[in-house]
Image (tube, helix red, strand yellow):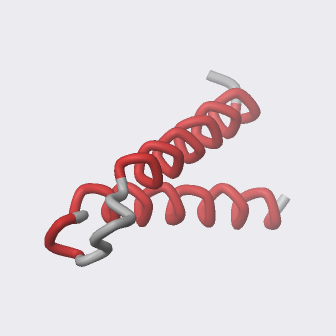
Amino acid sequence: MKPENRIKLLTFFSVFLLAFGITALNFDNLVFEENQKSYITIALGLTLAIMIFWSKLKK
């Protein structure tokens, strides 16, 4: 797989994780215990997005 295609795939996956995490978040009760999966998904999506951004900055 070409590096450009890999970055596009990771970008899509990052956006997917962020969208899923925000959608699954219970806005009526934002306590961590009630939204563990959502917060973890959002954190993974943000981490992946930062890694992608960092790799693009290095180029």
Most foreground residue, 47 or 16: 16
Residue located at (53% from left, 57% from top): 48
Pick the quarter of the image with the N terminus.
top right
Left or right, 29 with respect to 50, comes to left
Residue 58's quadrant in the figure? bottom right
Residue 2's quadrant in the figure? top right
Residue located at (55% from left, 46% from top): 14
Q: Position of residue 21 (x, y in %)?
A: 41, 52
Instruction: Count how many numbered circles sit on residues in the image.
Output: 0
Q: Position of residue 52 (x, y in %)?
A: 66, 55
Left or right, 56 with respect to 30, comes to right
Q: Residue furthest front?
A: 28
Most foreground residue, 35 or 18: 35
Most foreground residue, 26 or 42: 26
Q: Position of residue 50 (x, y in %)?
A: 62, 66
Q: Is residue 10 above or below residue 44?
A: above
Q: Residue furthest top?
A: 1
Q: Residue furthest bottom?
A: 31
Most foreground residue, 45 or 54: 45
Left or right, 18 with respect to 9, comes to left
Pick the quarter of the image with the C terminus.
bottom right
Residue located at (28% from left, 71% from top): 29
Residue located at (46% from left, 54% from top): 22
